Image (cartoon, coloured by chain):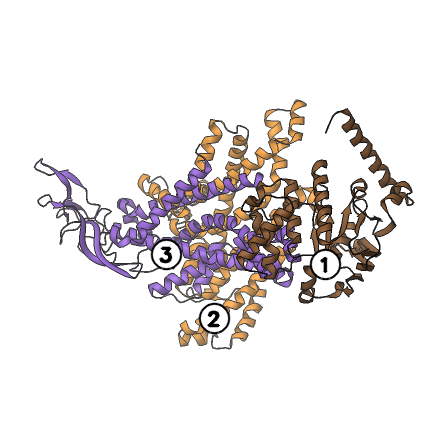
Chain colours: A orange, B brown, C purple
Amino acid sequence: MLTFVLSELAPGNFFDEMKLNPQISAETIAGLKARYALDQPLYVRYARWVESLAHGEMGFSFAYDTEAMPLIWSRAKNTLLLTITAMMIAWMLAILAGVWSATRVGRAGDRVCVATSSVLLSVPELVVALLLLVLAVKTRAFPVGGMVGLDHDTLGAGAKLRDLVWHLAIPAAVLVIGAFPILFRHVRASMMEVMQAPFIRAARSHGIHGRTLVFRQALPAAANPLISLFGMSLAGLLSGSLLVEVITGWPGLGPLVLEAIMGRDFYVVIGTVMLSTLFLVGGTLVADMALVAFDPRIRTDG
Amino acid sequence: MNSGKSILRVNGLSKRYVSRNALPRRRAGVVALQDVGLEIVIGEVIAVVGESGSGKSTLARCIARMEDADSGEVFFDGTDISKLNTSELRPFRSQIQLILQDSAGALNPRFTAAEIVEEPLVIQGIGTTEERRSRAVELMQQVGLAADWVERPVTQFSGGQRQRLSIARALALRPAFLILDEALSGLDLSTQAQVLNLLLELKQSYGLTYLFISHDLGLVSRIADRIAVMHAGQIVECGSPQEILERPQHPQTIGLVKSALAMRREINAHAAVGGR
Amino acid sequence: MMKQKTRVWLAGIFLGMLHVCVLFAGFFAPYNPAAQNRDLPYAPPSKIHFVDPSGRFHARPFVHPTIPDPENYDAYLEDKTHNCPVRLLVRGDSYAIGGVFHSNLHLFGVEEPNRILLMGTDAYGRDQLSRLVFGGQISLTAGLVAAILSLGLGLLLGAISGYYGGWFDESAMRVTELFMALPWIYLLLAIRAFLPLQVSPVQAFLLIVCVIGVVGWTRPARLIRGSVLSAKERGYVLVARGFGGSDWYLLRRHILPEMTGILLTQAAILVPQYILAEATLSFLGLGLGEPTPSWGNMLAALQQYKVISSCWWMFAPAVTLVIISGAYFVLSDSLHRLESASNQQ
């Protein structure tokens, strides 16, 4: 856990290095330079940046001509919405499918699931996103682009929610399809291992069957490695969300950071990257803590 | 048999294993060797016996400079080798050889028999490729392995044969002193006997000195001139096999003698019933 | 179920053939990938016929030239008045193989000035098939080179870390944890962001390869480190050291040969990831730019509504990406199973 705290501190330092890149001065117009105090020596700029960071600000965005922080944060909320939704759906499906598969290892249902997951694994997210987009366009069932329709504000509360959900569907679906195979495999493997354990057989002989057996006894035992997986899957999902947002037009951090790069809007870039890292580290920390709370064995070693 | 000059003298050797990760309370660590002293004469076969944890393996490794002791000296042929650095130690490396118990772990499974036996020569840069190869064949024959097995991969050799390979490799640099750390423990009784005979032959031919490390008192009493008993990092008793077996003094020795005799009774019983 | 070893061979041979095709891209592609034809933007693929409009059968297949439909804007018709026989081994635009040999022999083609467009054209009227094959050259090579870079770095740092330990090991592990804590796309983009936007194709290629390679070295490094740590405690290593073996000797003779298994499996995992990374970067516009074709920037056109709804042939690079991913997946999966089977023995 200590290492994660360290990592949390580290990204700040990491990006120092990049700030020292002379690119920054070279690209800016002289007038803007003066306005944004870029003609100050490097260490002064950095000091001021750190200071403003401590105040919760993240510098200025050149392109939007506004403070970077609120800009990044509003987009970040959208990305979080997308990522967390996809995460929950993917994990739910993976657990259900994984457990179901593990109880019928080798039989038809299991084989189908494993084969499907293999196929899905081979298809890159880029392609999945494009395919689903085509589907959306052709069937006109799902709206493409944006988070809400143009007339969103005029709708009633219930309709607003439905509008949001429709728009959320495609990006979330892409992320889920991307994440599901790996999660499924791990759940299945973990469950299979647990099902072989002696204590399961003992429970069975005591008359505990079916769903109780699986969910009350086996699953908690299998959950240990999965919680560690949680952190990694979060990383993958965050990375994937960037691409998906860009392709499907979901207004999250993805399109923002892309624009910022094209427009040489450095503070925005740094801010975005740092924020996404923070999310990731935060999520893994949560997973770590959950693991400690969940499995008493770990506490004594810590 | 004590007519020769001493080839190895150990003085006040002490070593303690400290675990770095433990809490400060536990830092005291485990005492492996405590002020151990020993003298070995040229041509002698001396055995150090004890139960696991008595420190005998640590002693062997410190003598062979696989590990370093915390304090004390190891005099080989008059020179204190315990304080030498790597380059100064090099000439002595060929003189003292260590043979381990785990023959499978001691031999790289990807090597052929020839590569195994040649390796010391390769490392020390002795001889040309052909010279090394012929010496390897020579050594293999001396330990009783067929010469045409030279190119076989190590995985095809049995446990006893692998030990012979280890011995052949140890002999490559013409050592004077051989340390065998539980080298016979993993083998069945008949193979043990064969390897023991081989070792005796080699001792005669080359004037070697042996240091046997074992937990098996019965085994070493067949070959040793002197036996030293170790317990908790110290040598508690020392004497000829006869003295040890017939008049054990220290409680540890008594325990070891008892189990050795028990095993021998079992073996004899087996033989009587019609085993080999 | 096929034996794992067979699968490895099959996947390996398939991939090998693909790579050879791509090496000889110029031969398999009928045209220069940069050759534009502004008269025919987004033309659909030419259909191959054996029977001509008058009902006669020809043994040699032919195509009709594609011409814009005078009645429908943006649509195309076949000009049935001309038959263009497809010939094998024709002379056409010249190209270079591996940058060294020059040739102008192509696998197939039709007589100038007609064009055979087996996979349609893009916005500038460039033949998609040619672009696909040349793009493959770029994308596959990028993946391979970046993987070699990553593995090389990982091997070096992991081996030093595992073998010597100490402060190097400590700091190296902290660094890997840092790298692994960051979501890789953001890291990739961040590094890319601080580098100039407009670069020549060659520079861009090298740049991308380096960036991708540097981002991905951590996982192989950790695995190598672990393996080196356990290898250096083996009995035969200690014995060899007892004979006076130097560190370099021990590494070279005993420890590094154990690494080949890990390197292979990691390669099978990393190469497709890197091919995708290059495609993603190019797709987003941060990789290779015009006119160099890359599967990524070829797919970028699909972001337009018009293209994605009616020009199905533009999906070709996506198909190839899936095929390559699939083949590598089979390869790595089988390798993985082989390795765990042999570890159990």
Q: Mark 1 points at which residue?
A: B65
Q: Where is residue C109 in the image (x, y as percent from the top left)?
A: 18, 49
- Kindly report the distance in space between the C-alpha atoms of the residues bearing marks 2 and 3: 24 Å
Residue that label 3 marks: C282
Rounded to the nearest angstrom, the CA distance separating label 2 from label 1 is 52 Å
Label 3 in the same subunit as label 1: no
Left or right of C7 in this view: A91: right
Vertically, is C146 above or below A38? above
At a point 31% along the width and 41% down the height, the residue shown is A138
Q: How many other residues sit within 10 Å of disc 1, few (<14), some (14-19) or many (≥20)? A: many
The amino acid beneath tag 1 is Arg
* Badge number at residue A21: 2
Percent of width and height locating residue C341: 54, 38
Q: Which chain carries label 1?
A: B
Check chain identity for marks 2 and 3: say if they share one.
no
Residue at the image point whose x is 40% and y is 51% from the top: C276
Secondary structure found at label 3: helix
The chain letter for the residue carrying disc 2 is: A
